[in-house]
Amino acid sequence: MNSTLLKLGKHFKNIVVLDTGSVRNSDCEEFIKFFGDRYFNFGLAESNMISAAAGFAIAGKTPVIFGSARFLLSTAFDQVYNDICIPNLNVKIVGLGDGEVDKELVKILPNLKVEDGDFATLEKMMGEYGPAYLRVAA
């Protein structure tokens, strides 16, 4: 178990991973092998995935969302704003790749902690309650 996501899955039993499947992510692939019952692939339905993450958070889970940085906030902005940021839910969003659009959008989202980094940064974010957005360069 080498990946950060696997370590987090082992340490935090309440983590669920939601993924668009649009970006190759070896961390998600490893997570599925060990915790397949806590992985959900939504395909290219970012808005639905964000709303589902809000439901998981309300139910006591800690959703970690993976998707293309280019699309996560631009196509699901209303859901991120209304479903996650306004109620200050404990949802972690990981935007993979180049996300020029998201750099401007995150500035106006309330309660959202924003970081640039790698998967080790995700581990730090898990220790803090509240919505968080991590931009991971390709």
Image (cartoon, rainbow, N blue to C red):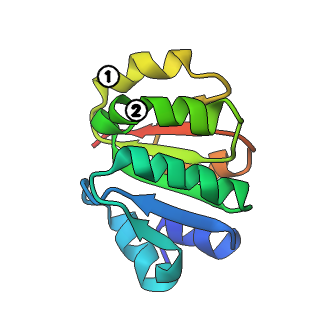
Is residue 135 at all visible to an observer of this figure? Answer: yes
Residue 52 position (above or below residue 84): below
Q: Locate residue 103, reporting x and y percent.
A: 40, 21
| Residue found at x 46% / y 81% | 36
Q: Is residue 36 left or right of residue 58?
A: left
Ranked by sequence position, the earlier of labels 1 and 2 is 2
Amino acid, disc 2:
Leu
Q: Secondary structure at mark 2?
A: helix
Q: Which residue is mark 1?
A: 101
Q: Which residue is mark 2?
A: 73
Quadrant occupied by the C terminus: top left
Q: CA distance from mark 1 to mark 2?
A: 8 Å
* Residue in the foreground of this view, choosing between 34 and 51: 51
Mark number for residue 72? none
| Residue found at x 62% / y 55% | 55
Q: Are the residues tagged 1 and 2 within 8 Å (C-beta)?
A: yes
